[in-house]
Amino acid sequence: MTISFKINGKAQTVEVDGQTPLLWVIRDLLNLKGTKFGCGQAACGACTIHVNGEAVRSCSYAVKFAADKEITTIEGLSPSEEQLHPVQQAWIDEIVPQCGYCQPGFMMATAALLNKNPNPTDEDIDNSIINICRCATYYRMRKAIHRAAKLTQANMSASTNQEETTSETH
């Protein structure tokens, strides 16, 4: 089956069995290794990516459902190579990773949460971020999620101020 989609802003076409999990297309065919295999049952979240902005467990998402969709992996989360996404920066600032294996999935789930809820409470985080971390860095992740929310809000304020300044000078 020929399937076309956009991944991290680039058009891709793959020839693959439509039932193949999107995870294996991302890792094996497109050679994007940041998305991890954890359980193969959509339970742990290590394989979390975005499909049209929604967090999806790619190990159980058949590639045929990705046709004509926009996919973002951890490699495409940041706006540029020079600038980290606020979630990535917060993860560094709070020294979240221990082994790091599950972290791309957590960061993708967090980015999706912040897109929907820019100022989540602890309860919002508990209800939305249901990934599993064997190293139990949950406390640091919670701190990083709150920091990422603040960084995102600061970035949005800075962008708004810059746009206002630019429009005033023209």
Image: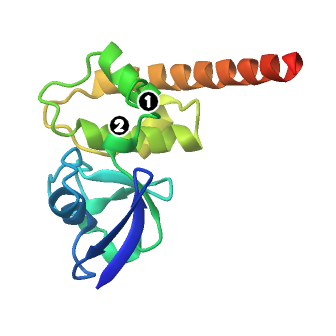
User: Where does the C terminus fall, quadrant-wise?
Assistant: top right
Figure quadrant of residue 59: bottom left
Residue 58 in the figure: left or right of residue 119: left
Residue 137, numbered circle: none
Residue 18: give x, y in percent of width and height: 28, 81
Of 146 and 121, which appears nearest the observer?
146
Whether the residues at callouts 1 and 2 have beta carbons within 8 Å, the answer is: yes
Residue 79 in the figure: left or right of residue 158: left
The residue under label 1 is which amino acid type?
His
Residue 63: give x, y in percent of width and height: 31, 73
User: Dot 1, crowdedness within 10 Å: few (<14), some or many (≥20)?
Assistant: many
Residue 153 in the figure: left or right of residue 51: right
Cα–Cα span, label 1 and label 2: 10 Å
Q: Residue at x 22, y 26 (%)?
A: 137
Q: Residue at x 24, y 59 (%)?
A: 26
User: Is 147 drawn above or below residue 123 in the view shown?
Assistant: above
Nearer mark to the viewer, of 1 and 2? 1
Of 29 and 50, which appears nearest the observer?
29
Q: Earlier in the sequence, mark 1 or mark 2?
A: 1
User: Is 111 drawn above or below residue 122 in the view shown?
Assistant: below
Q: Which residue is mark 2?
A: 107
Residue 44 seen in this snapshot: yes
User: Where does the N terminus fall, quadrant-wise?
Assistant: bottom left
Residue 169: give x, y in percent of width and height: 86, 16
The residue under label 2 is which amino acid type?
Met
User: Dot 2, crowdedness within 10 Å: few (<14), some or many (≥20)?
Assistant: many
Q: Which residue is mark 1?
A: 85
Of 32 and 108, which appears nearest the observer?
32
